[in-house]
Every structure is written in C-alpha cells, then in structure tokens.
Image (cartoon, helix red, strand yellow):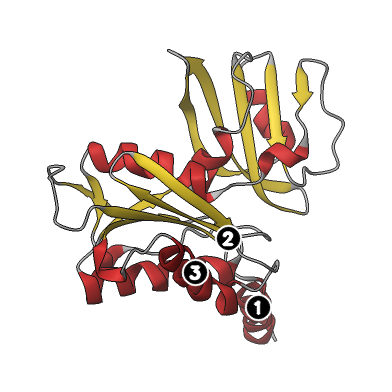
Amino acid sequence: MAYNVPMREVPNPYNLAIETSCRQGSVSLGRGDELISTVAIPQPHRHAIELTPAIDRLCKQHRVKPNQIGQVYVSIGPGSFTGLRIAVATAKMFAYVLDARLVAVPTIDVVAENAPTDRPHLAVCLNTKRDQMYAAVYRMADHRWRKIIDPALMTPAELCQSAPAPLAVMGDPLPDFEWPGHVELLDRALAVPTSDVVWRIGRDMAHRGEFTDPLKLLPLYARPPEAVELWNKRMEITKSE
C-alpha cells in the first residue's frame, strides 16, 4: 500500500530500480531524474544468487556507495515467486539499513509501457495458467496508457467481452484461444519487463509522493504458489473423506 509524502531533496541523490519478475532480471541506476545505466542479471532464473552482485557491480562501476542510494523502485509482480521475494527483500534491506524510500511498481504497468502507442486500446496479460491470465486494459490518452479496467484474473473470453475494440493484446505466453477479428496479438517479446522502465515509472511515482511503507511492501501474486494450491486441494480431499 502506498502512502503519499512530499518529494524532497535528499542527501542521498541516487536511485535504484529492480526488475526480477521475469526470467531475465535487470537493475538500473539513476541520479535524480537522470537514468545512468542498466545491467542485466547474467543468468536467467538466478535472481537469488545474482541480484546482489549485479547491484554491487553497477554501483562500483559508477563509484556509487550503497548509502548514497536514497530511493529504490521495485517491480512487485505478478511474476516469478522467487524473483519477487528476492527483489522485495533487497528493497527492504535498503530501507531498513540505509533509510532508502521505496516505490512499489506494478509489473503489469511496466509491460504496458513497451506497447506501440498508435493503438487505441491495449490489454496486458501476465501470469497465464491454463485458461486464465492476470490482465488489465488500457486506453491511449495524452500519449500515455491509462488503465480503464483494473488487473484481475480472467479468461480470454471474459477479456474480449469486457474490453473495447479494436484491442491490442500483449502477453508471454498467451492462452491457446481463438481470438476474434478485432483483436491484434502483439509480439510476445514486447511483454518482457525491464528495470529501465521500472525506473521511469518509479521516478514518476516518487515525484507524486507515492512511496510504500517498508513494512507493507509485499510481492503481488496473481494466484497462490502451485505448492499451496496442491496443499489446499489435498486438505479439501482429506476433509471430504
């Protein structure tokens, strides 16, 4: 949950953006409103091992000490369960140890920023499982994507019924579905979130004072982990016997 506090000049002028919701994570470093550099986490699916070294390399490359980072913008999901937990834990470390302020950036908004801006409507679909996906719908207005349907779990049929036409749809992957003629499926490569976009959105949110209390910063999960779902099903079966 975000709370609004004034944007103020701080003695620690650098800011950091973390994206670990997908297979290939990345981190970005900025100073004030200037994005300095972005680096990819070297190996996919190794956020738990590679995130802290990647941040360390990025800071050393630009001679930035950790205590100079005053704000951290973190992509909170939905996405990789492990990746999100590691990112949130790392952001909280900056808050508790170095008094950095935190911004929770919804991953679905990060992905939306990758879409072409010449379409009137956009649906971003994440965390696809079976015939359901976590989706939100946007309208292009004033050269920006404005959310008109809040993120929720839905089927492709429900999305097509509720969203305006024509509709561009972006996801990696999308469910196997016979999409109607008014729907354009965008290149799935566009559905990959990156830390430079997290940085840009996070910086805008920081200017609006939309910071998150470290105690309330949590990953955004579209659904429970598969292990939890299996456990709940077993408990239901056991109770019915």
Helix, strand, or loop for circle 3?
helix
Is mark 3 in CB contact (under 8 Å) with mark 2? no
Distance (Cα) linking label 3 and label 2: 34 Å
Closest to the observer, 140 or 156: 140
What amino acid is at disc 3?
A: Arg
Q: Is residue 191 left or right of residue 13?
A: right
Q: Is residue 155 above or below residue 97?
A: above
**Is residue 78 in view from this perspective?**
no
**Number of numbered tags placed on the structure image:** 3
Q: Is residue 217 left or right of residue 158?
A: left
User: Could you tell me residue 96's position as x and y percent?
Assistant: 23, 74
Provide the residue designation for mark 1: 227
Provide the residue designation for mark 2: 223
Distance (Cα) linking label 1 and label 2: 11 Å
* Quadrant location, the C terminus: bottom right
User: Could you tell me residue 143's position as x and y percent?
Assistant: 47, 15
* Residue 56 sits in quarter: bottom left
Q: Which mark is residue 57?
A: 3
Name the mark nearer the viewer: 3 or 2: 3
Q: Report the residue at 58% width, 74% height from top.
A: 50
What amino acid is at disc 1?
A: Ala
**Is residue 162 in view from this perspective?**
yes
Q: Is residue 11 left or right of residue 180?
A: left
Name the mark nearer the viewer: 1 or 3: 3
